[in-house]
Amino acid sequence: MNNRVHQGHFARKRFGQNFLHDDYIIESIVAAIQPNKDQALVEIGPGLAALTIPVSKLVDHLTVIEIDRDLAERLKQNPLLTDKLTIIEQDALNYDFNILATELGKPLRVFGNLPYNISTPLMFHLFEFANIITDMHFMLQKEVVTRLVAAPNSKDYGRLSVMAQYYCQIIPVLEVPPSAFKPAPKVDSAVVKLIPYKQKPYLVNDVKILSRLTTEAFNQRRKTIRNSLSNMFSVEQLIELDIDPTLRAENLTVQQYCQLANAWK
Ligand code: SAM
């Protein structure tokens, strides 16, 4: 049985629980994060503390956000973590990270082996707090990392690529096989580092428009933008902006999406 009891805990599929148990991978992730004493580290989904314990040894204090009450209770009881941990028992998807940055009085360093079922919406949620985040290290499905770094003119290039690359510099760190987890997921995984730009390469006046634009374009990615973006731009407007109306969503660069977002009225 795949999701068998682990340290007395039964892995919950609905919370995307695949626990890391490979020491080499765990050490490599912690080495990539390079936690430092006075920094505000925040872990999403600490689970059975595979990353939490080694990171906590390197910092004075650590905040974790865990949705599973049973796991939160275990963390509270863990003698290795006493005094070091603030546990937020909440859905990270709804959490207002501004509260934490204000409380701690410093920018956040976020990390986690993310539940794969919510990793993309969670990253979109975190992008909204990009200005109070120094960096993020995430374990994701390898396919999601491929999409994060994808360049235009490829099938992997989509809304996630545009939005992530608008907000962050993205650095793949490490590939991780299914055997590093219990239970083992069906897919390969990878760790990625996202560094929100202090000064973005392309400025957008209203990011909501960029968000809408990329949704409309990539929801109909096979159509030419003259059709998929017809609710927002006429063919004449596209030509005026020097953007070929016969291109498809995947042919436009991040810069061109930003240019379009700023031109929309
Ligand atoms: N960090 C542990 C590890 O590496 O072994 C566990 C990783 S497991 C893939 C994902 C963790 O995120 C689980 O502990 C799960 O309960 C938690 N989780 C799932 N959905 C969550 C949510 N919406 N908000 C906060 N934590 C969540």
Image (cartoon, rainbow, N blue to C red):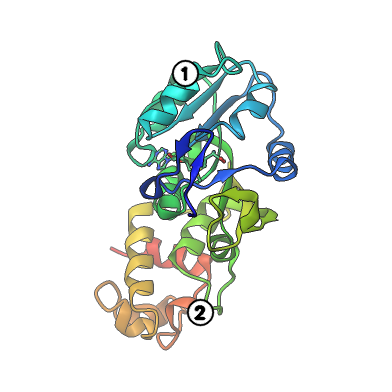
The amino acid type of the residue labelled 2 equals Asn
Amino acid type at image mark 1: Lys
Asked if one can make out residue 25 in the rendered structure from this viewpoint, the answer is: yes
Which of 217 and 189 lies nearest the eye of the viewer? Answer: 189
> Residue 36 or 26: which is nearer the viewer?
26
Nearer the viewer's eye, disc 2 or disc 1? 1
Quadrant of the rendering where the C terminus is positioned: bottom left
Crowding near the residue tagged with mark 1, few <14, some 14–19, many ≥20 C-alpha atoms within 10 Å: some
Residue at x-position 56% and y-position 78%? 154
Q: Quadrant of residue 34?
A: top right
Q: CA distance from mark 2 to mark 1?
A: 50 Å
Circle number at residue 251: 2
In the figure, 11 relative to 261: above or below?
above
Residue hosting label 1: 76
| Name of the residue lying farthest toward the bottom | 246
Image point 46% across, 61% down: which residue?
160
